[in-house]
């Protein structure tokens, strides 16, 4: 299960970059959906680890599009 601070920071980052993109007239793809299959046991390779990797990739892609 994720640290809520990290999850909240990711969601805030999505909102911030989407707002910047809207103001700049840039279209971003949808951010990754939060996983809904976590068992909460802290598994190695937890679905949340994959989500955070997808969040990082989405952020990098969004920043590249905004820099153009």
Image (spheres, grey):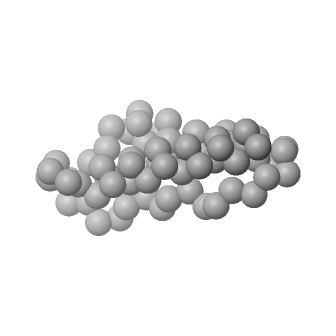
Q: Is residue 41 left or right of residue 56?
A: left
Q: Position of residue 58 (x, y in %)?
A: 54, 51
- Name which quarter of the figure residue 37 lies in: bottom left
For image coordinates 33% across by 38% down, the residue present is 3
For image coordinates 56% across by 56% down, the residue present is 31
Q: Position of residue 57 (x, y in %)?
A: 48, 49
Q: Position of residue 49 (x, y in %)?
A: 30, 49
Please tell me which residue lies in front, 57 or 46: 57
Reply above or below: 27 against 18.
Answer: below
Q: Position of residue 42 (x, y in %)?
A: 16, 48
For image coordinates 39% across by 47% down, the residue present is 52
Q: What is the quadrant of the C terminus in the image?
A: top right
Q: Is residue 15 visible?
A: no
Q: Is residue 18 left or right of residue 59?
A: right
- Name which quarter of the figure residue 19 lies in: top right
For image coordinates 39% across by 49% down, the residue present is 53
């Amino acid at each position: 299960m994720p640290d809520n601070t990290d999850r909240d920071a990711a969601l805030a980052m999505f909102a911030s970059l989407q707002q910047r993109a809207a103001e700049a007239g840039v279209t971003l793809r949808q951010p990754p959906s939060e996983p809904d299959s976590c068992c909460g046991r802290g598994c190695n390779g937890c679905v949340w680890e994959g989500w955070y990797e997808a969040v990082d990739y989405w952020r990098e892609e969004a920043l590249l599009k905004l820099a153009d």
